[in-house]
Image: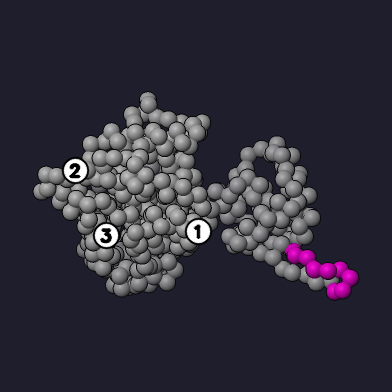
Amino acid sequence: MGLESFTRDDPIFIDESVFRDNYRPTELIERDDELAAYQSALRPVINGAPPKNIFIYGQTGVGKTLATRLVTDRLLEDQRQYSDLNIKQITLNCKSVNSSYQVAVNLVNKFREPDDYIPSTGYPPTRIYQMLWQHLNDLEASHLLIVLDEIDSIGADGEILYEIPRANDNDHVEDTYVGVIGISNDFTFRDSLSARVKDSLCDEELHFPPYDANNLRHILSRRAEKGYHNGVLEDGVIPLCAARAANESGSARMALKLLYKAGDLARQRDEPTVKESHVDEARKLIEEGKIKDELARLPIHSKLTLRAITNLSKVDETPAKRRKIYSLYLELCKEFATDPVTDRTIHDRISQLRQKGFVEAEEKNEGLSGGSYNLYDLKIRVDAVDEALNLEA
Ligand code: ADP
Ligand code: MG
């Protein structure tokens, strides 16, 4: 039959873009208390006073980024009625940035044209901060809010979270009040910061708890009205997506993904309605996709270790001792022209693979004389590894 023609009618979705990650809803449902707290933390700004520094935390998918966008958009809009205010805002997502230094470099570049960007290595840190202060002093603004999203990815190195909130107090920046809004997906991040950083960053802390099934039902229903044709979703579908997501993570992102994927499956199969069975299937597919992504992101020596265990498993030689895994790993290193790391390091890598649920261990005890040792085996399907790890020699 070959290719089918592209047609415009979609019996399932009115507008599937509302389920995509880059869709920007105009309201935050079921978060009135958090919004009120957020607005109250920003109130000094509208009164012309220096901003408080705000630290927001909660797991992924609980509305932190969306809340921040809605609240700061509103602030920028509402300031227009006050002629003494000129509030500006910049946002940096720190996901792929892993040190204070790089945050500072990225911030400097926010104020520059692309041909004037500074490189991400090379300057001494003090020089980078000087450039940053210079840009902030050149800015014509009464206030500057610097939003650092997913800030936990800078790890324990919180220098920037000390420097920026102190920019006015330390006389680095004069005519513009500077405030930081730090957003973290990781609960432990705040505690990992040193006392002086905590002190300067966390004037106000806002916690976004996970959504419960009720919250998620509302969020999904509202989105479904925009995305799905009337009557296409069978009654149990939204409650099921909400219950699953509430159970596993409390994440609206996950719930929306599930609802979208379920519809996508119904559409692929030319079925007129979305059923609970589509949700179950969608969940499986999403889970598999996650494993695949995680496998693909493993560092090279973890991949080679996993490949060694997988190859042993294919010839029924698992569970295997570490010595056996290591010697196969050494062969693979040769094959892929990679310098091997030590047996000890591979031991750590295997522990990480266990933590991620890719490998399992069984402890063997040889009694008084033999001591104890582990036997390792693959915990996921061999083809999952084969699909995700297409290492090229
Ligand atoms: P976080 O930053 O906490 O990881 P986001 O703000 O990015 O979460 O939200 C994740 C997804 O869920 C986004 O697509 C967002 O549109 C949606 N979402 C989260 N909370 C709500 C809510 N209360 N109302 C509507 N949509 C929401
Ligand atoms: Mg976010």
The reply to whether residue 258 is visible in this rendering is no
Q: Nearer the viewer, residue 3 or 151?
A: 151
Dot 1 corresponds to which residue? Answer: 192
Q: Looking at the rendering, in which quadrant would you find the N terminus?
A: top left
Q: CA distance from mark 1 to mark 3?
A: 23 Å
Sort mark 1 into few (<14), some (14-19) or many (20+) by Cα contacts within 10 Å.
Answer: some
Report whether 84 appears left or right of 320: left
Chain part drawn in magenta: 367-375
Residue that mark 2 sits on: 86
Residue 333 quadrant: top right
Residue 214: x %, y % from top left: 31, 73
Question: Residue, x 33% and y 61% (percent of image)?
Answer: 204
Residue furthest to the right: 369
Q: Looking at the rendered structure, which numbered label has been put on residue 346?
A: none
Label 2 is placed on what type of residue? Asn
Q: Position of residue 198 (x, y in %)?
A: 43, 57
Label 3 is placed on what type of residue?
A: Ala
